[in-house]
Image (cartoon, rainbow, N blue to C red):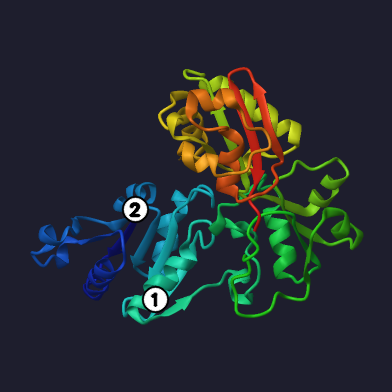
Amino acid sequence: MYAVVAITKHGVDIARKVGEQLPNAHVYYTNKFARGDEAEKGIHVFEGNVRLLLPSLFQTYRGLVLIISLGAVVRMIAPLLKDKKTDPAVVVVDDKGEHVISVLSGHLGGANELTRQVAALLQARPVITTASDVQKTIAVDLFGRQFGWVWESDEKLTPVSAAVVNEQNVAVVQESGEREWWNYDTPLPSHICVYSSIPEALAEKPDAALVVTHRLLSKEEEAILQNGVLYRPKVIVLGIGCNRGTSAEEIEAVIDETLAELRFSGKSVKAVCTIALKKDEPGLLEVVRKYGWEFVYYSPEELNHVHMEQPSETVFRYTGAYGVSEPAAKLYSGAENLELVKKKSGNVTISVALLRH
């Protein structure tokens, strides 16, 4: 949700226009310029100084579009700033609607994109000063976010970003995940080189690195993270079968143990797949909700159409399918060969596949 705020007569005109065209926008302006139709249009009217309103808006909205002078905005928001990972996007529009300026949380908060949106609907000029946007290069803090990639740690985001924008030698090592991460219509800058393995990149002694993998790194491989950021793409698919009433704790323990054995990161899990009989299994549902994983289930007929290395007559008698975890993982991932065909542990059976991009 966005808040669009104005305190001048011309600003109110702009705020109403933005509020009508920007999705999920709430308009706020001073009662001095109320027009009588605010309640009907869902517009919020406030009394007094806008400075008193900003703290609550700062906490409530993911982005603020302020039709107020840039200097005044800087002074008002300064006491409210906490962290770029939590502060909302702040965008300033001048009183004629000619310039839209990205002020705060340009990348992580989405202010740069919000700036482009508002500028487009006002036919104004977007003003963005983030170096990676201006230079059309990799935004380290946003790398792969459109695909759901997550950082292992944000410790090196700043120095790695500096290496990218200062055109030092940067390695992108990609072992898994989506390959369509370059968003510009220009070629990848010459100082950024893509490698398929960490040893290959280390041999070139890059100044910084962006590493995309679902694997846990070895001690030797961790050398690349001295000035590097590790990203976890969503590529792991878990096929799971379990006895009725199996606890979430047991299911989670088997998942953790299995991923550790494979040396895979839990942050790269994308989906849990099973048979339709288990679509309401409380333990399974609790685990997928806890981690925000996709939960997919298939009919016995769908599962039986998949080639299985280890079909089971016993499973067929109880479920109508010759297997659950193995074919479910194959169906979702499209993989012919699994990283783990099938393992039974207590009340849980698990198979593991990787999505190929």
Q: Give the residue displayed 72% in from the left and 66% down from the top.
A: 164
Q: Is residue 266 visible?
A: yes
Query: Which-is-in-front pick, marks 1 and 2?
Result: 1
Q: Relative to residue 283, is residue 96 drawn left or right?
A: left
- The amino acid at mark 1 is Ala
**In the depicted structure, whether residue 335 falls above or below residue 304:** below
Q: Give the residue displayed 72% in from the left and 75% down from the top.
A: 189
Quarter that holds the C terminus: bottom right
Give the quadrant of residue 34. Answer: bottom left
Q: Residue furthest left?
A: 36
- Where does label 1 land, which residue? 119
Q: Tell me how far mark 1 sits from mark 2, CA to CA.
A: 22 Å
**In the depicted structure, whether residue 233 falls above or below residue 136:** above
Q: Which mark is residue 54?
A: 2
Please tell me which residue lies in front, 323 or 47.
Answer: 323
Q: Relative to residue 193, is residue 85 drawn left or right?
A: left
Q: Which mark is residue 151?
A: none
> Mark 2, residues whose alpha carbon is within 10 Å: few (<14), some, or many (≥20)?
some
Upstream in sequence: badge 1 or badge 2: 2
Give the quadrant of residue 313. Answer: top right
- The amino acid at mark 2 is Leu
**What is the x, y in percent for residue 318?**
49, 23
Quarter that holds the N terminus: bottom left
**What is the x, y in percent for residue 9?**
21, 73
